[in-house]
Amino acid sequence: MGILFFIMSPQENEKDVFFENGTMGVEDLTGYNLNLEEYIGKSKSMIEGGIEKVKFISSKKLSANDKEYWLLEYTGYTSNLDLYFYQAVWLKNEIAYLITLTAPKKGYKKYQKIFSKIAASFIVK
């Protein structure tokens, strides 16, 4: 998978050890013949293999800008940090487009609304 961009929040104070962040990635799925549901199933397996104590909060198909996408919300531990992940996935022409937004589990609600707006505003052309 290639990362197209990475954004992160500024440090809030000296005790802030995690910078809330967002990434946009693309994955070429040419030849795999996966639909969105199948891709999400494989993604969940990979998430479970890479994040400790993962718990899926939400997994649903949505629509915005006349395009379907899948929204995954989950929590888990990475580098001993208890994190919240908000991931939106689109498939077009055998390419997966993923936006993943990450924040500490404690306090993620502060970012949930903006995370949702970012995902809903994305357009795959």
Image (spheres, grey):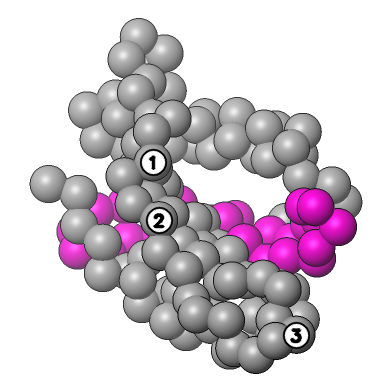
Assess whether mark 1 and mark 2 are in contact (beta carbons under 8 angstroms).
yes
Q: Position of 37 compared to 18: left or right?
A: left
Which percent across, then down, holds residue 16?
Answer: 70, 81
Residue placed at 47% from the left, 84% from the top?
A: 113
Task: Depth check: give the residue in front, 22 or 32.
Answer: 22
Mark number, residue 78: none
- Give the quadrant of residue 66: bottom left
Say what secondary structure mark 3 lies in: loop
Based on the picture, tell me whether residue 66 belongs to the magenta stretch: yes
Q: Amino acid at mark 2?
A: Phe
**Residue 99 appears in the rendering:** no
Q: In the rendered image, which residue does mark 3 sit on?
A: 15
Marked residue nearer the N-terminal end (1 or 3): 1
Label 1 crowding class (10 Å Cα cut-off): few <14, some 14-19, many 20+? few
Image quadrant of residue 118? bottom left
> What separation in Å lies between label 2 and label 1 (alpha carbons)?
7 Å
Whether residue 108 sits left or right of residue 55 in the image: it is left
- Quarter of the figure with the N terminus: top left
Q: How many marks?
A: 3
Q: Secondary structure at mark 1?
A: strand
Q: Main secondary structure of the magenta part?
A: strand
Residue span colored magenta: 58-85
Along the horizontal axis of the image, is 68 left or right of 87?
left
Residue 89 relative to residue 49: left or right: left
Cα–Cα gap, marks 1 and 3 = 29 Å
Measured Cα–Cα span from mark 3 to mark 2: 23 Å
Residue at 40% from the left image edge and 56% from the top image edge: 6
Foreground tag (3 vs 2): 3
Give the residue number, with chain letter if any, for mark 1.
3
The residue where tag 2 is placed is 6
Mark yes or no: residue 109 visible. yes
